[in-house]
Amino acid sequence: MNKPRLILINHYASIPRWPGPTRNFDFAASLVNRGWQVQLLSCRFNHYLRGYLKEPPAKEAGVCLKWVWSTPYQGNSILRELNILIFSFTSFWRGLFLSAGAVVTVTPPLESAFCGWLLARVKRVPFVLDVEDLWPDSIIGMGFQNKFVIGWLRFLERFLYRHADHILAVAAEMEEYLIRHGVPASKITMIPLGANLPAEISNQKRNEIRARYGWSATEVVAVYVGAHGPANALETLLKAAQVLPEESPLKIVLFGDGSDKPRLCKLLSALKLSNICIEDPVAPEKVPEILQAADIGIASLKNTDVFKTVRPNKLYEYMAVGLPVVCCIAGEAGRLVEEAGSGIQVRPEDYTDLAKVLQKLTADGSYRRELGANGCHYVRAFGDRVQLAARMGEVLEQVIYDHEK
């Protein structure tokens, strides 16, 4: 079967030079290398830069990039919901003028996924739902209580699960959740977020990066790279830094951005801690070299049941470069780290446990290297995005074939 054109819709998708998730771009580029023609629709207002992209490319790595206009916003407000709604309808309109053999839409948000389903039905092609987070369960777990909004989102969620021709899930617990809610197992494929396998940097480059950020040769640097939102429970890292021994060579560094970052910066300033700092976000293409210049990777989420179903992308990124992982996430993420032998699980939001584990890893360089090697081996075997994209392509080919029969 000739590889058809694919419409891939992800409100928050980014490319490596700008902050934001690049999984869909990476998958699209791999599919292009396999003969697919992929059109990736994303919002021109970048959620992470809090502004419109200037002169974004129309094509990169063979992927046709369609930057869809929507309204600006700052933080979580009604303006953000307006941005989501306008993007959803505008991406539907843009998609009407694109040819496609299938439509794949990432959720959240659910609104753009619904418009993706509608687009697929108008074009009479299969609709594939790519579930990267359970919505609205995630916002409920964060304390959101508006019954009207939750009811609307719950309706959209159930509708999409019922009417999708196939569903991709990024974690096994998500797959089980879908099955419990009536989705046939035959209709679900689990494809993890994965990571790109980066080129190894030289010792000179590593030293240059450490010098750039003021990390001395004797410091053991533990990094967190990712979103700075309420869901990430990053105050736990600040509290852990408070209880570390003064003589400890450990330094905790946070890279990223998000709605909670101003509060965290203000809190850090008040605490006057020298063993933890918060840096500006970096482009995804720069993340691997920063991770290779560090010594430990930290993953953190709030202690809620819904986060027990996730496998954050940063776990794979840390393991891909050989960083030992301190996983402050319960459930599937912790089990993944244990299965890979790549790190240590810590009770979410338990700063004393986090400080204890960080001290243990700081004191034992050989143990850090052993965990890092295990994680690197695991990602090469099970988390390489090139391999995962090939699996996605196989699934899509089968879905299209079944639809055309």
Image (cartoon, helix red, strand yellow):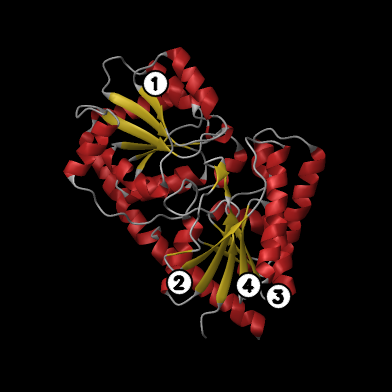
| Distance of label 1 from label 3 (alpha carbons) | 55 Å
Element marked by disc 4: loop
Considering the numbered disc 2 on the image, is that residue within a helix, a strand or a loop?
Answer: helix
Residue located beneath label 1 in the image: 241
Q: Is residue 371 above or below residue 168?
A: above
The span from disc 2 to disc 1 (Cα, nearest Å) is 45 Å
Q: Nearer the viewer, mark 4 or mark 3?
A: 4
Depth check, front residue: 161 or 89: 89
Residue 43, visible in the rendered structure = yes
| Mark 2, residue position | 32
Q: Contact, CB < 8 Å: mark 4 with mark 1?
A: no
Sooner in the amino-acid sequence: mark 1 or mark 3: 3
The residue at which mark 4 appears reads as 98
In primary-sequence order, the first of circles 4 and 2 is 2
* Amino acid type, mark 4: Leu
Q: Is residue 341 visible?
A: no
Mark 3: amino acid? Lys
Which residue corresponds to the image point at 50% horizontal and 32% vertical from the top-left? 348
The kind of residue tagged 2 is Val
Q: Which residue is mark 3?
A: 123
Instruction: Indicate whether 158 appears above or below 372.
Output: below
Disc number lying in front (4 or 1): 4
Q: What residue is at 78 percent from the left and 53 percent from the top? A: 155
| Image x and y of residue 68, in percent | 62, 57
Upstream in the sequence, badge 2 or badge 1? 2
* Residue 26 versus residue 396 in the image, above or below: above
Task: Give the image location of residue 240, x and y in percent.
Answer: 42, 22
Residue 224, picture quadrant: top left
